[in-house]
Image (spheres, rainbow, N blue to C red):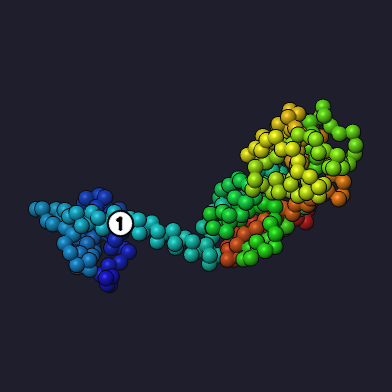
Amino acid sequence: MLNDEVTLRKLEILCSFVRTGSLVKTAEELQLSSVSIHKALHSLELGVGCPLFIKEGRQLKSLPAALYLAEASADLLSDVDRIIKKTRSKAGVEAGQIRLGSMYSLTANIIPRLIMGTKIRRPDLDIDLYLGSNADLMKKLIEGNVDAVVIAAPSENMLDGIELISLFEDHLFLASSKKNKPAEDSIDLSHYGEEKFLTLQDGFATTSGFYDAFALAGFEPNVIMKVGDIFSLMNMVSSDMGRSLLPGRVRALMGDAIEFTPLLAKYQVTQRIALMYLQANESNLNILALAAEARMLHRKN
């Protein structure tokens, strides 16, 4: 059972002593005196209630019990450090880093602008970018594996405890190769029942919108292939392997190789692109800077 003699500081001293094998080196590493190190180790031994060391001449040698305690304590100290950092983050004391999740399709425009604007507000901030599907990134946000995400906003019943800042709305277009572009200016999807289609794998917002649009048209599309990222999908469409439904935001990437034709109003599917983060982190100064930049981008769009 723990007592006042067993402290995290003494466990840290033990880990250092076991690693260096020397009272002098431990004292230098922790900026303490050798006497203080010796007293801390002796006090820890009393607190644990079993022998941890043996004297060999003037040297102090760690017994197997001390080696085990040091090994286990290293994991404990690492966990405590992680818990304190997360606690500081929850309290709004910034750690100098944000883990930002994004859909692939946003990396050509909105994400660079969001990151650059946030860095201007907080120059010392490091932003790590994680790319993935809508479903994967939403899961990472809820589980705390990322701090914020920019994705297509899910349904309202999935937003409990989440702060949302809208950036812009997007629509799906029929995407065709330039050599196989439609003759009409607006697409009636009900006329495309025999066409070959490509789409993204399940979990992507564009995939959900793809099937929603065809549900409005009253039939299941003939999907010949699903791919894992929107850039591969666009390359396949431009090579005339099939058509797809793509969001307008990617038109700037391959507008010279892909024809984007709007759908008739009754088939249009709208995506609301938004920055989202947990309300528990809304006092974090880094998150506040990110949110402020998102609001400014929303006003400009």
The quarter of the image holding the N terminus is: bottom left
Q: Residue at x 28, y 63 (%)?
A: 10
Q: Residue furthest bottom?
A: 4
The residue at which mark 1 appears reads as 72
Viewer can see residue 48: yes
Q: Give how far across and how far down residue 165 sits, in percent.
A: 70, 59
**Disc 1 residue crowd, few under 14, some 14–19, many 20+, Cα 10 Å:** few
Res. 74 image quadrant:
bottom left
Q: Residue 227: x and y, percent?
A: 65, 37
Q: Relative to 239, does residue 271 appear above or below in the rendering? A: below
- Taking the view exactly as shown, the residue that stands out farthest to the right is 184
Q: Residue at x 35, y 59 (%)?
A: 76
Question: Image check: 12 left or right of 188?
Answer: left
Which residue is nearer to you in this view: 124 or 82? 82
Q: Looking at the image, how many numbered discs can be counted on the residues?
A: 1
The quadrant holding residue 185 is top right
Q: Is residue 260 visible?
A: no
Percent of width and height locating residue 144: 54, 58
Q: Amino acid at mark 1?
A: Ala
Choose between 85 and 94: the one closer to the eye.
85
Position of residue 270 measured from the top left corner of the image (x, y, whole percent)? 78, 52
Left or right for 192, reference 292: right
Instruction: Name the residue: 21% across, 51% down.
Output: 22
Q: Secondary structure at mark 1?
A: helix
What residue sits 87% from the left and 42% below the top?
A: 188
